[in-house]
Amino acid sequence: MNINSSFLTANQEYQKGNYIGALHVLNGLLDTRQDTRTYALLGARFLKLDMKEEAASAFALAGNAGGTDAERYLHNAMMLHFECGNEDDALVLAKKFLNRAHKDADVAFVMASIFIKRGQKDILGALRKPLIESGKPDHLALALHLLVDAPHDEDNFKTIRRTLKLFPDNQG
């Protein structure tokens, strides 16, 4: 069976709801082809089966294999590892995005959450801004937690305004 027909078969099995069959085809494909496309497809299938740790590992392999979507796969792997509690793996991947952590709220969230848990708050100043500007409630909650250490900071007012905007019924 050639590679394209293997991908087609795996997709067809998946579409029919035969997830185990799709994984079996992909596993066979990994014996002959270990590339971005195969790992990404495997990661997506693991994710649909709610096998998040396996999906994270497959997406990390896909991202490390390179290609145009490498960053997206690494980002997915980072978030899944963090969600599964694999903080060391998540942090290793987050550090690959260090140059954009001051703009990417997800990367800032992962890094700040892990560093706070490890008692390393002193290095988190640059991570506050993307968290403050994020529309995700858990990001904003973490930003509030970080601002406790800088009570007279102008960012406090921005954070409070954004919090009140996100939760208008909870102003007590």
Image: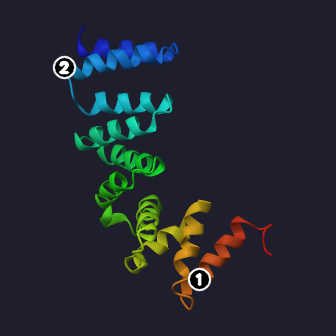
Q: Residue at x 39, y 55 (%)?
A: 87
In depth, the one of 2 and 108 nearer the eye is 108
Residue type, label 2: Thr
Q: How is the image coloured?
A: rainbow
Three-letter amino acid code at the position of disc 1? Asn
Residue linked to disc 1: 156
Q: Position of residue 44 (x, y in %)?
A: 42, 31
Query: Circle 2 — which element?
Result: helix
Q: Residue 170 is drawn in which quadrant?
A: bottom right
Residue 115 in view, yes or no: yes
How many other residues sit within 10 Å of disc 1, few (<14), some (14-19) or many (≥20)? some
Quadrant of the rendered image containing residue 157: bottom right
Q: Residue at x 35, y 64 (%)?
A: 100
Q: Are marks 2 and 1 in contact (CB under 8 Å)?
A: no
Which callout, 2 or 1, points at the residue further toward the start of the chain?
2
Residue 27: horizontal and vertical position, in percent?
Answer: 30, 20
Image quadrant where residue 8 sits: top left
Quadrant including the C terminus: bottom right
The Cα atoms of the two marked residues, 2 and 1, are separated by 55 Å
Res 135 visible:
no
Q: Residue at x 48, y 49 (%)?
A: 83
Mark number, residue 32: 2
Which type of secondary structure does the marked residue at label 1 adopt? helix
Left or right: 113 in relation to 58: right
Please tell me which residue lies in front, 81 or 16.
81
The N terminus sits in image quarter:
top left
Q: Going by the picture, which residue comes out furthest to the top?
A: 1
